[in-house]
Image (spheres, rainbow, N blue to C red):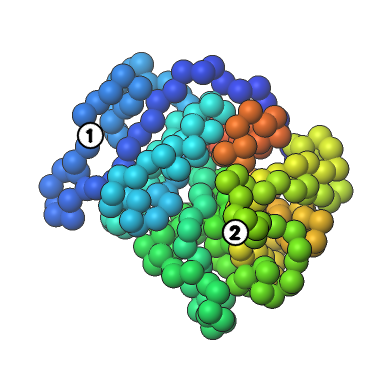
């Protein structure tokens, strides 16, 4: 995959909200319009032509409670990189199918849930957290659409793991239990428990997209996970490792589509230049994909 680094767009932004809609055939409920928001489907001439990036809610519970702080980190990163974040509901699959064609790229966020081990042919060894079926199904539909329509995907932490499973890969259900690593990969791995995410380096493979974005053979990353990729999925190239060998980044090689999974959380590495470039490169890919679709149309 070739690198497409572009300068960030201007700092104005809009966001769309999708969620908490009724299940009947009536028009969906939408929140009151705010100065920094536009309503889905609005065709006002002042609507800027920014790429639209779909972000599913992290969990069913957070969506039900309208619990926004962690989701907002992803939205702000997308907005700062020059795109329009669009929240995707986990609870309205029919509406998801209607909205997917209007989206230019997708961010699959982290989650406190774990992917159901049955999805990769394994039994729960007692360390895998409860699955969120609605989140799994939503991500599954997003990936099915993104691969079919050649739309870019940035998969983060849980999203990276689900991407791997979607493509036929498997997961380590608990790093400490299965690999005996001494490197802390989450706050609980530090005694006493750390207040902030542990930091370690990730080393990037030659000729990889992550290497090109980082501009160096390694970079410091945060860490907030207890699972990781075991066997990579079909056409996924492993392009980043932690010092203990844990897979930290993968890239799709099945075609030219921009699909990258990272095990860390760039959306909350505030002020980090590498994280900003990663989101900027993703948004550039979304903008390019939208242009390709427009040309075909």
At which x and y percent is residue 156?
A: 58, 50
Q: Are marks 1 and 2 in contact (CB under 8 Å)?
A: no
Is 62 on the left or on the right of 145, as rendered? left
Task: Identify the residue shown where x is 51% and y is 18%.
Answer: 11
User: Which residue occupies the foreground of this view, 93 or 271?
Assistant: 271
Q: Which residue is label 1 attached to? A: 31
Label 2: how many residues lie within 10 Å, few (<14), some (14-19) or many (20+)?
Answer: some
Is 171 on the left or on the right of 79, as rendered? right
User: Is 71 placed above or below 205 here?
Assistant: above
At which x and y percent is residue 2?
A: 75, 40
Q: Which residue is label 2 attached to? A: 188
User: Which residue occupies the foreground of this view, 96 or 264?
Assistant: 264
Can I make out residue 249 in this image?
yes
User: Is 32 placed above or below 224 here?
Assistant: above
Label 1: how many residues lie within 10 Å, few (<14), some (14-19) or many (20+)?
Answer: few
Q: CA distance from mark 1 to mark 2?
A: 38 Å
For the N terminus, the image quarter is: top right
Q: Earlier in the sequence, mark 1 or mark 2?
A: 1
The label on residue 5 is none
Task: Identify the residue shown where x is 51% and y is 45%.
Answer: 106
Can I make out residue 238 in this image?
no
User: Which residue occupies the foreground of this view, 296 or 89?
Assistant: 89
Task: Identify the residue shown where x is 75% and y is 66%.
Answer: 181
Find the residue positioned furthest to the front.
192
Mark 1 element type: loop
Task: Identify the residue shown where x is 39% and y is 67%.
Answer: 133
User: Is 108 placed above or below 9 here?
Assistant: below
């Amino acid at each position: 995959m070739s690198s497409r680094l572009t300068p960030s767009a201007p700092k104005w932004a809009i966001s769309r909200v999708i969620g908490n809609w009724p299940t009947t055939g009536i028009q969906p409920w939408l929140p009151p319009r705010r100065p920094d928001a536009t309503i889905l489907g609005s065709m006002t001439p002042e609507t800027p032509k920014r790429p639209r990036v779909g972000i599913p809610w992290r969990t069913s519970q957070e969506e039900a409670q309208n619990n926004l702080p962690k989701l907002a980190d992803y939205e702000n990163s997308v907005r700062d990189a020059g795109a329009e974040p669009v929240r995707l509901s986990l609870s309205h699959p029919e509406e998801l199918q209607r909205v997917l064609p209007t989206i230019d790229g997708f961010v699959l966020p982290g989650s406190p849930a774990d992917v159901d081990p049955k999805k990769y042919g394994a039994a729960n060894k007692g360390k895998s957290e409860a699955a969120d079926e609605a989140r799994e199904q939503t991500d599954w539909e997003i990936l099915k659409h993104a691969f079919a329509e050649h739309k870019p995907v940035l998969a983060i932490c849980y999203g990276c793991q689900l991407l791997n499973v979607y493509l036929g890969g498997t997961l380590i259900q608990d790093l400490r239990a299965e690999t005996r690593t001494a490197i802390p990969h989450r706050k609980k791995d530090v005694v006493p428990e750390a207040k902030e995410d542990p930091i370690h380096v990730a080393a990037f493979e030659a000729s990889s997209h992550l290497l090109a974005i980082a501009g160096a053979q390694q970079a410091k990353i945060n860490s907030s996970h207890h699972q990781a990729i075991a066997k990579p999925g079909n056409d996924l190239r492993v392009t980043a490792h932690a010092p203990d060998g844990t897979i930290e980044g993968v890239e799709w090689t099945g075609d030219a589509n921009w699909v990258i999974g990272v095990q860390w959380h760039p959306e909350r590495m505030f002020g980090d230049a590498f994280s900003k470039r990663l989101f900027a490169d993703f948004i550039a890919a979304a903008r390019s994909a939208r242009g390709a679709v427009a040309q075909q149309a």
